[in-house]
Amino acid sequence: MPIVIEQGTNRYRGLVAVGLAVAVLVVLWASGLDPFQRGQVTRVLIYAVAIAGLNVATGYTGLLSVGHSAFFGIGAYTTGILVEKAGWGAWATLPVAAVCFAVGLLVGLPALRIRGLYLAMVTLAFAVAFPEIVARFDGLTGGAGGMAIHRVNLRPPAWSGFTLGEKDKWLFWVAVVVLAIVTYLIANLTRSRYGLAMSAVRQNEIAASASGVNIAIVKVTSFGISGAITGAGGGLFAIYLGNLYAEGSFTLMAGISLLIGLVIGGERTMLGPIVGGCVLIYVPYYTADIGQGQASAVLFAVALLLVIFLAPSGIVGGLGQLSRRILVVRPGRPALGRGSVPAAPASSGGHSSPNDRGHSALDEPLTGIERQNS
Amino acid sequence: MTALLEADSIVAGYGGATVLHGLSVTIDPHEVVVVLGANGAGKSTLLATLSGQLPFTGSIRVNGETVSKVRPDVMLRKGVSLVPQGRGTLTALSVMDNLLVGASTRRDKAGIQQDLERWFSVFPRLDERKDQVAGTLSGGEQQMLAIARALMSRPELLLCDEVSLGLAPVIVQGLFETLREINQESGTALLLVEQNAELALEIASRVYLLEVGEVTASGSAEQFRNDDSIRAAYLGY
Amino acid sequence: MDIFLTRVFSGTTSGSVYVLIALCLVIVFRSTSTINFAQGELALLTCYFSWWLTEHGWNIWLAVVPGVVLGFAIGAIAERWLVRPVRKRDESAVLIVGLALFTGLNGLDGWIWGSDDKVFPRMLPSGGDSYFTILGARLYYDSALIITIMAVVVLALTIFLTKTNVGLQMRAVATNPTSAALCGVSVGRVLTLSWGISGALSAFAGALLIPMVPPGQLGLGSMFDVLIFATAAALLGGLDSIKGAVVGGLALGIGLALVNGYLTFIGGSMSLTVALLVILAVLVVRPTGLFGARRLERV
């Protein structure tokens, strides 16, 4: 029954074209919404970028992090500081995700010696520490009281054709482009040899190391890339909000929220971060009147548990599995061959292997080695 | 005479791999049976199945009754106790505590006390070290502890997984002597799994040969000792 | 000298609370090799429950009892139905379950009882005049009581673990669950019991703690910082060591009191920062802590 389409064929190209067309239509529709709605969509896009960054470290490399709120914050404050203190144009600060990359490398260093629970605790410490650090360097950051970015500094660049008053519209388009670029980069990254290494490290470090993967480099750079992408989202966030308040937006709860968004949306999928962003923005919005504003927290918890127990690959992964009953996309036959790409047949939207979670009971007996701290 | 343990057409394995391909073994009361086989033949898998740790297809009967739910505590209550490969010492606990844990399924305080005294006299080294942390014991002492711990549940059948592993020959000799005594005095049946089984064969009455998950030969210990090809392959001479 | 002693007493008091919650973390870790991220939020829920009872006229000491029972129940249920099914699968799945509980329990508190701060009745006498004077330093009655309570709890726990059959089984499962199972120990029941005890103890500790920590009121954020302190204490002592939890908790409490007292030039409360540094230092330098024996990963 399932329709099978092979990559590289005309039918496949047609499928991709349809997908792109749908995406373009959605974006165009969103850009035409009233400012408030469009602002919500912008927030979704910004969080999608942040979650996509988290996806690189946690989803693809298996390094669980609740501390990406700190990367988000570093990106935001970097933009804020450069704009307010050093007079940079706001829109030029986005490439300063490089700062986050460097910090990410640093945070990734403990991952060399510890994993799993202990690494998560390091990221937890990182997340809790960030507002403290912000408060302590109050000369630079405005401290606990927050930092304001003057609106006039957020004027869209002249070549964009947008006026200061249309700053939000310009931000919307920038967010769309950034998310598209990030998604494309991550897609390529995960399909490359590096992506294979990430996947190997996630599933079985010992076997990966024995196969010649340099797990140290993979883990550390993975954190770096992950931090950089989330930081880029943070920069966008600073422009969106114009007002930075660490205790509100860059706390441990925020870091946990990003993780929740990723897991519910779907780890190791391309669309998962976007779904996660939607969940994070719209669920609290629509449930603000229920349960004294706390309903969304409970709903997230329930959704998270449902995902863990019923659909470990999240909403996108789960839908992807369902859709595979109707439509299956196969890698092209002559080109790479099945052996070199560890992908199960992927549908056009998802990119997940449902059996990825966990490892088989054979893993340890096969390597014959007890797990040690690496 | 009803067999003590009958395992019928056992198919078992790990993950996706089948290790045992429908094998059957029987142990009679008071017997000493040895299972020989190379690495990977499935000996430990067999013991893991018989002690209730692995799911399997087939049936296991103890004293004629089929065991419906085969789990470690169930098999233990039926009188089947395992001395695991690698000793399985509870390293953070004292020697005494290790033995007490072995008696977890029993409620008779007086009987437990009696057994403690008995095993301390059979293994005086354990008595000397009874309050010592078990992880600090030598390999041989930990093996004695593992055997004594398994015996604390007063089993009818003791499964021994490579008791000789990593121990000096003189110690192994002592251990097998002790096992023979235990078999003769208490009547506890023994199922010994060994790779290099020269010493084990001396106290055994029957032998099974396991190859790639199937019983390929069985017979009396005498026959096995006298069979040149088996000796060459499994006894090293 | 008396100021130093006063600080030591104050540090011992807060340290005692850290010990109690660190013990909860350690009991769970010894049984299931994971940390229950939601430990603090579990305590928070039971505190809200107890508070709600006091609003209906219950005396606070009586109200804590159902709270403790509730803590036991939630802990036990969480282990049996939420943690055990996913443990075999993936260690990160267990962490995510913990985070789900963290978020959900906190949200539940807000949903049922509102996000405004509540006044939580003091369990122990306090006030300007109620203190001993020892070597010129003040030891408040409620501080002395908390330290005593901690000592009693540690003693009771030690006796339970070393002198009872159930305690022996718990220790056996903590060391080697497979061997324990082969000896007929019901490992599942032991795990459930461990989580239950941990939940009950954290409920009790929470009730003691809430009035002590500024602002002395019960709010949704009451347990955030405590979790960090308890985690630092447990890590410092070694996540699988009861003795370590005691040493770690007291060391952290006294250490923080001294740091805050003497290093005032840095300004502001250093407590959280120091605790975070302790966590980082332990994880990077010696993950098994001072007295821990476990390897980092379950094999």
Image: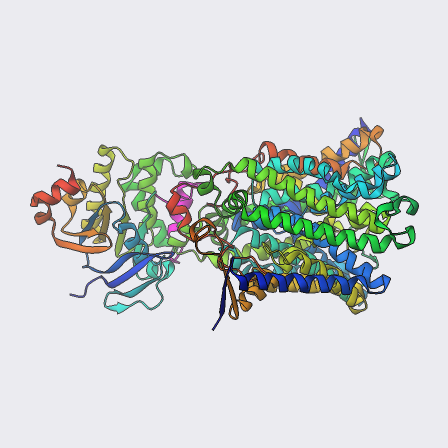
The coloring applied to the image is rainbow
Most distant residue in the front direction: A10
- Give the quarter of the image for residue A24: bottom right
- Give the quarter of the image for residue C120: bottom right
Quadrant including the N terminus of chain C: top right
How many callouts does the rendering have? 0
The percent coordinates of residue B224 (x first, y second) are: 11, 47
Q: Residue at x 27, y 43 (%)?
A: B163
The percent coordinates of residue C162 (x first, y second) are: 50, 46
The percent coordinates of residue C87 (x first, y second) are: 52, 55
Q: Is residue A294 magenta?
A: no
The percent coordinates of residue A322 (x first, y second) are: 54, 68
Vertical placement of B202 versus A306: above or below?
above
Q: Residue at x 88, y 39 (%)?
A: A84
Relative placement, left or right, of B218 versus A367 is left
Q: Which residues are magenta?
A: B87-108
The rendered magenta stretch, by its main secondary structure, is classed as: loop
Q: Is residue C57 visible?
A: no
